[in-house]
Image: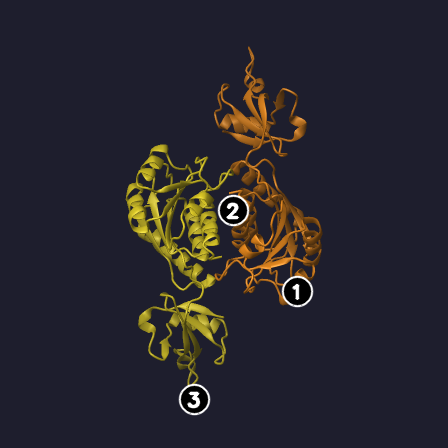
Chain colours: A orange, B yellow
Amino acid sequence: MIRFFTSPENIRETSIELTSEDRLHLRSLRIRPSEEFIVCDGAGTDYVCKLKNGKNENKADFASTAVILRQEKTQSEPTTHCTLYIAYAKGDRLEYAVQKSVELGVTGIILFKSKRCIATFDNTNRKLERLQKIAHEAAKQSGRGIVPIVKNGGEYEEILNTAAIRDGFSILLYEDEKHLHIKQVLEAKPTFSQVAIISGPEGGFELDEIMQAREKGIHIASLGARILRSETAPVVALSVLMFHTDNL
Amino acid sequence: MIRFFTSPENIRETSIELTSEDRLHLRSLRIRPSEEFIVCDGAGTDYVCKLKNGKNENKADFASTAVILRQEKTQSEPTTHCTLYIAYAKGDRLEYAVQKSVELGVTGIILFKSKRCIATFDNTNRKLERLQKIAHEAAKQSGRGIVPIVKNGGEYEEILNTAAIRDGFSILLYEDEKHLHIKQVLEAKPTFSQVAIISGPEGGFELDEIMQAREKGIHIASLGARILRSETAPVVALSVLMFHTDNL
């Protein structure tokens, strides 16, 4: 079914105000008055709608409001909330990681700077805007009930604190970790509804950065014997997390 | 450690003949004579080498052969062999799926054409050549012991037969499968060392194509409530497969 997000102020008791963008979207899809589509409030509620179909209406009216037929909780949101922390990387790598992790069900994405980051993150607002747009598109296309927010978390130490304190259960992906695999880390934790995944830059983490994370109680985990690219690792970690928590 | 592939004919008893490409590669990396590097035969054996370091040698000699210090089985190959069948897709989507699945440990990749394929696959040889190059690079970078081969499998029905007969245990990813999730399919199979994953085109599979697969004993599995893009699905499926079989 056709599906898009709207901001809460457009939602009335029995109808939804369609923005000009929504109208163009629906027109381009040649939607028929009889056809149902979903407008999601981005807060986990889907509104199943039809276009207002009154008498002597003109084209503009025709698509200006949608009648709410019923509302239901979005079925696609995972039961486990995962915040993904990704180190700055070249544009396309970040865009890729954002798009795929939104498809996979990430709750929020926080970017950070660690020692071996080659990529800078200037024009922060423009870059965040672009990444947020990608997150929005991915959320729409994959049928998410929310649009995950992409933020800039700044320095490595800051995000370590956020992960350790706010997310609680936190896993840092480290290619040189030889003993603990992500499976063991996940299986050692009986139940959790919130988790953080921390994924490093192309050059990886430095040893003292690993120590720093350990001191804060963050679990260091390997993703196996094959070296994954910086944009692949978070997608693989999210896949196995969703699999492990029965969200896949 | 620096690592690249060579073809078996370059491997002698105690030394390895370096191609001009290898020599340029090693020079560009400013490798020192004392430094060890790995030459892999692409058949699961790593040769730990050093550059030949004789007297009064000139630059050319210097890097023309590598002395084999020891050989060992490549540690990074997964114990489960997975053949990935991917439907034709636009160039970048295929390239992405090939690169990531090689990083994840796929054994071989076979492309096919199903009813809803929009992308064609003409200039087949040129395209296969390009995809093979991407597979080679990904294998080198991720530390694989083999370079997975990318082939064109032709029509959907043909690859269904190959998967059912040659691979045995086969899983087809279907977004409209509402009951059986990939976890259930994997857990229902006690042990396996060979598996096929079949991933469809952007438009998905048609119902009669699903029936066709079922008739051949291929398992139909869902990857969860969120709709994954055609290039994301195989990467997610491989991730959970490697996780499930303790290869991650």
Q: Which chain carries label 1?
A: A
Q: Are marks 1 and 3 on the same chain?
A: no
Q: In which quarter of the image is residue A208?
A: bottom right
Q: Mark 2 lies on which chain?
A: A
Q: In which quarter of the image is residue B62?
A: bottom left
Between A150 and A185, the residue placed more toward the observer is A185
What SS does tag 1 mark?
helix
Left or right: where does residue B227 sit relative to residue B17?
right
Between B148 and A181, the residue placed more toward the observer is A181
| Residues packed near mark 3 inside 10 Å, few (<14), some (14 to 19) or many (20 plus) | few
Marks 3 and 2, Cα distance to the nearest angstrom?
58 Å
Q: Name the residue under label 3.
A: B55
Q: Residue at x 34, y 35 (%)?
A: B211
Q: Name the residue under label 2.
A: A243
- Residue type at the position of mark 3: Lys
- Residue type at the position of mark 2: Phe
What SS does tag 2 mark?
helix
Q: Are marks 1 and 2 on the same chain?
A: yes
Camera-side mark, 3 or 2? 2
- Residue type at the position of mark 1: Met
Q: Position of residue B78 (x, y in %)?
A: 42, 59
Residue B151 numbered tag: none
Camera-side mark, 1 or 3? 1
